[in-house]
Image: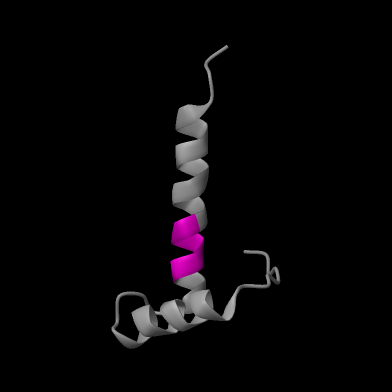
Amino acid sequence: MKIISVKLPEQYVEILDQLVNENVFETRSEAIRLAIKKLLQEMERLQPEE
């Protein structure tokens, strides 16, 4: 995997930390990877077929 840096609003980081603290995700990175994966899948689904 590649490492990238992103800037997030403080509120997003607080929510990510809460999800990690509640053991919904093991790490912030895991949560962010899943969110990006779902976004990309949704965008692919919405692409018009050629």
Residue 26 lies in what quarter of the image?
Answer: bottom left
Horizontal relation, residue 22 to residue 16: left or right: left
Q: How many marks?
A: 0
Q: Nearer the viewer, residue 22 or 2?
A: 22
Residue occupying image coordinates x 46% and y 58%? 35
Q: Is residue 30 above or below residue 10?
A: above
Residue occupying image coordinates x 52% and y 73%? 29
Horizontal relation, residue 1 to residue 28: left or right: right
Residue 30 percent across, percent down from the top left:
46, 70
Q: Nearer the viewer, residue 2 or 24?
A: 24
Chain part drawn in magenta: 31-35
On whether residue 24 falls in the magenta region, the answer is no
Residue 2 percent across, percent down from the top left:
67, 65
Residue occupying image coordinates x 68% and y 72%? 7
On whether residue 32 falls in the magenta region, the answer is yes
* Quadrant for the C terminus in the image: top right
Q: Is residue 37 above or below residue 7?
A: above
**What main secondary structure does the magenta stretch of the protein show?**
helix
* Quadrant for the N terminus in the image: bottom right
State the residue lying farthest toward the top: 50
